[in-house]
Image (spheres, rainbow, N blue to C red):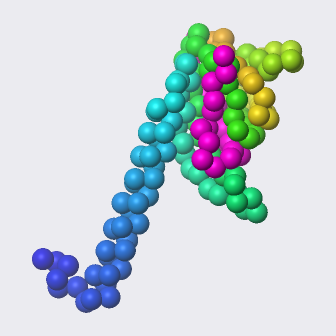
Amino acid sequence: MLGSMMPPNRRVIAFAVALVAIGVGIGVAVDRMAFAQQPSNGIKRTILQRVDEPGAANYEAVMAIAEIAPGASSGRHRHPGVELAYVLDGSLVVEHDGQASYTAKAGDAIKNEAAVHNAKNIGTKPVKILAVYLVEKGKPMSELVP
């Protein structure tokens, strides 16, 4: 009833704002659902934001929080692009195929360039990592590797 008392141009604006809000909500739900459908193997990823990478029509940047439970690991996987990560809390061992493994702790930065890797939580609390993925559009954020 209130909408009928609004001038026509305000009703159009209110309707457009409502459509945008619904679209953003659906986009966030789809992102979260896409991550939820991936096999977790001990890692949980929550997308914070996603944006097309300027100048590269087939890539996008995705910022996410990754959490690994105590004693769990991500499983051997790769990303279709580059992962830049910052350890917010906890400590983990990072294993890259063909390289020596290393320990990363809160305050350390990690880079994974489409290489097969595994991250193992070696602490007693969850590891929390802020990650930015530069990945090919339309591909899964991560692919498990046997």
**Horizontal placement of 40 versus 93: left or right?**
left
Residue 140 visible, this orientation: yes
Asked if residue 9 is positioned above or below residue 54 in the image, the reply reads below
The residue under the point 41% across, 66% down is 20
Quarter that holds the C terminus: top right
Residue 61 visible, this orientation: no
Residue reaching furthest to the right:
99
Residue 121 magenta: no
The residue under the point 17% across, 85% down is 5
Picture coordinates of residue 52, whole percent (x, y): 65, 58
Picture coordinates of residue 74, whole percent (x, y): 62, 21
Image quarter of residue 104: top right
Residue reaching furthest to the left:
1
Residue 139 magenta: yes
The residue under the point 63% across, 24% down is 144
Picture coordinates of residue 125, whole percent (x, y): 56, 16
**Residue 61 or residue 86, whichever sits in front:** 61
- Range of magenta residues: 124-146
The residue under the point 62% across, 42% down is 139
Quarter that holds the N terminus: bottom left
Asked if residue 3 is positioned above or below residue 123 in the image, the reply reads below
